[in-house]
Amino acid sequence: MSRRGLELIKSFEGFRARAERLADGRWVVGHGHTLSAREGAEVSAADAELLLQYDLLPILNAIAERIALPLNQHQVDALASFGQAVGLERFLASEVLVWVNAGEPEDAARALIACDAPPLTPAPDPAARRRAAESALFRHDPGQEADLAALLNAPAPPPAPVPETPETPEERPAEPEDTPEPEANGARALAVAALLGETPAAALDETPEQTAEPEAEAEGEPEAAPEGRLTRPPKRLPS
């Protein structure tokens, strides 16, 4: 993490010499530090920066471990700032990381702009401005030093539609309706059902067996129609 990257994060997180309570009940101190913050805690500017560097360690480790492609320092700083703002779990699940690993830096920068997830702690500037600064830093020429003032004043356009991430369902061949859905889709359905207050069985009550029966009947001899039920006449052959 470069000095310029640290200054970017500090500019948006601000500095709290004394711990303040957040709306969710947690305490925050320094530059957005919540892990060990508690009521009455006080930190100096130097200690606040050390806490920030400590908070960035898991983000930087994730960048090193989860991204196989080479990154320049500006890109590392931008991704670290983004990860510190949204949290490690959301960072790892973000489309930004997907596009970086796909070797599409421009799409990754656009995904940064489109991500409106707010920082973990209240920041002096709206989240959209921070995403714009991170996107500008990610795109910056690696051979030139990034100007902090220019980054802070980077325009924040309205989020544009982000290109579909690689290997989306739209890009995969269409599957027959009677094919069981992948396990990941089943887990997503369970999660949606839980949010809607439904039982897990209600979200997955259409099983492959329910759709496979018509095919089995088609392979064998046609069954006799029950009494009172009309059967479809065979097609006439052309004369």
Image (tube, rainbow, N blue to C red):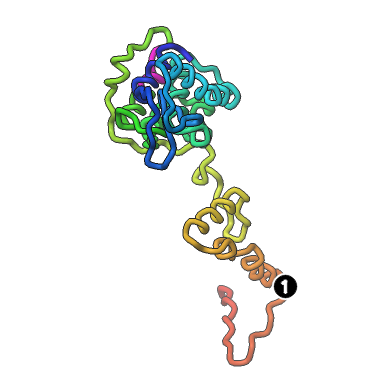
Q: Is residue 137 magenta?
A: yes
Q: Position of residue 139 (x, y in %)?
A: 39, 19
Judged left or right of residue 12, residue 193 is right
Question: Label 1 crowding class (10 Å Cα cut-off): few <14, some 14-19, many 20+?
Answer: few
Q: Secondary structure at mark 1?
A: loop
Between 46 and 222, the one lying in front of the other is 46
Relative depth, front residue between 48 and 127: 48
In the rendering, at what x and y percent does residue 206 appear?
A: 59, 65
Whether residue 135 is visible, yes or no, is no
Q: Is residue 26 visible?
A: yes
Q: Quadrant of residue 82?
A: top left
Residue identified by numbered label 1: 220
Characterize the magenta stretch by its predominant secondary structure. Answer: helix
Give 210 or 223, whichever is nearer the viewer.
210
Q: Is residue 198 left or right of residue 163?
A: right
Name the quarter where the C terminus is drawn: bottom right
Residue, x 63% and y 56% (percent of image)? 180
Query: Would you identify the image quadrant in which residue 30 lies?
Result: top left
Q: Is residue 4 above or below residue 120?
A: above
- Estimate the x, y position of residue 189 in percent, counting from the top left: 54, 55
Name the residue located 62 percent from the left edge and 50 percent from the top edge.
183
Given residues 104 and 226, the one toward you in this image is: 104
How far across and how far down the image is residue 170, in percent? 49, 45
Furthest residue in direction right, as rendered: 220
Q: Which residues are magenta?
A: 135-141
Does 186 sit above or below residue 30? Answer: below
User: Farthest bottom residue?
Assistant: 228
Residue 134 shown in magenta:
no
- Can you say whether 69 is above or below 128 in the image? above
Question: What is the three-letter code of the residue carrying label 1?
Answer: Gly
Residue drawn at x 48%, y 33% as measured from the top left: 87
